[in-house]
Structure formats: C-alpha cells, structure tokens
Amino acid sequence: MGSPKALIEIDGVVIAQRAAELLKRCCSRVIEVGPGYTDLEQVLEDQPGAGPLAAFIAGSAMLDEGTPLILMACDMPAIGDGLIGALVNHQSEQSVVPFADGQLQTLCARYSAEARGLAPAVWESGGRSMRSLLDNCVVEILNAAEWERFSETFAFNDLDTPEDLQAYRDRGPHS
C-alpha cells in the first residue's frame, strides 16, 4: 500500500483511530499493540512485525489475568459496534470466533482466558498464527446467522490492497 495500513484515511479519520474509537465504546480497556498510531495506551511486541500472535501476547500481558480479550485488526473498517458488542457480551466462557468467507475470522474475535494463558507456550513451540493458538483451545464459532444480525456481510473484508480500499470506498458513506 506504500505506507502503514493503520494510517489509511477514510472519511477524514485514520483507520487505526477509527478502530480505537469503536473498541473504546465497547470495551472497558483498550490497548494498541503498535507504534502509537492512536490515542490509546500502547505497547510494542517483543519482535515487531512478527505477526498477530506476537502482538496478541504483548497486548494480553498488559491486561488482568483470567479475563477474555477482544482482538481486532484495524484494517477491517466495516466492523461496527454491533459485532464487537456481540463478541464482548457472548455468554460462552470459551474463545468466540466469527466464521465468514469460508474461514475463522481470527483477527476480529474474543479470546478466552484459556487462550491467553496458552499463547506463550504456542509461540515457544513454533506457532505463529492465531489459528495455531485456536488449535490448542476450545472455540465457540459464531456463524453467519449469528453475526449477520449485527453487521454487514462484508464486515470482515480487510484492506490489503489498493483495490480493497477502493471497493470499500465505493460502498458509499461510512459511519
């Protein structure tokens, strides 16, 4: 994309700050794992750029033990309050991961205390993806019939290419 995706502007707001504002509305404590693109409390992973599991471990270390956390990548600007609220308020004690587009949406999910506790061992054993973490714990899958009540069907489309960004902008006004 030519610059950090977190700094892409949509409707005059960088997407990292957009994600921060969304999470602040729905969660009691919000932490940016990254270089400080937002006004949030911030932490860097031990190996910046090592991927989502490394970021998850760094962010998780900042939170109270024994509680779940919401992980959300900032490059999914169609995610809204309804979906995050559904994850936050889900009754399961397990990790809750939406299933869309034929795959688990591991970068917009609620991770259980169990998953948080297992993450460092998964990393040490060579796991690097969020999927490798989920393979080691119990997961509640949030299917489309459940999450589409709260969100658009394209909510999980991320902005990986200029074409993705243009497709998002072509959808019209964004709240």
Image: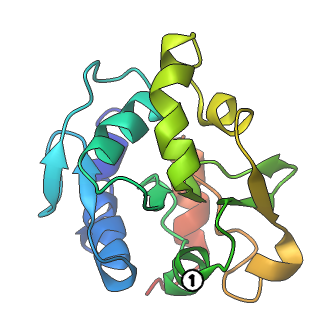
Q: Is residue 100 left or right of residue 82?
A: right
Is 146 positioned to the left or the right of 45 in the image?
Answer: right
Q: Is residue 150 visible?
A: yes
Q: Is residue 93 left or right of residue 84?
A: right
Name the residue rendered at 64%, 66% in the picture.
93
How many labels were placed on the picture? 1
Q: Residue furthest front?
A: 66
Q: Position of residue 24 (x, y in %)?
A: 29, 77
Specify the quadrant of the image occupied by residue 87. Answer: bottom right
For this rendering, which residue is in front, 45 or 119?
119
At 35% from the left edge and 46% from the top edge, which residue is drawn?
Answer: 60
**Rendering coords of residue 65 (x, y %):** 35, 52
Q: Is residue 40 above or below residue 75?
A: below
* Neighbour tally class for label 1: few under 14, some 14-19, many 20 plus, Cα within 10 Å: few
Q: Position of residue 110 (x, y in %)?
A: 56, 61
Q: Is residue 153 above or below residue 41?
A: below
In the image, residue 31 sits, relative to residue 22, either above or below, namely: above
Q: Secondary structure at mark 1?
A: helix
Task: Indicate the position of residue 68 as horizontal and vertical percent values.
Answer: 48, 61
Which image quarter is the N terminus in?
Answer: top left
Which one is nearer the viewer's eye here, 39 or 10? Answer: 39
* Three-letter code for the amino acid on which mark 1 is drawn: Asn
Q: Is residue 1 visible?
A: no
Residue carrying label 1: 89
**By what rule are the colours in the image chosen?**
rainbow
Kindly identify the residue that appears in the image at 34 percent across and 61 percent down.
15
Q: Nearer the viewer, residue 38 or 90?
A: 90
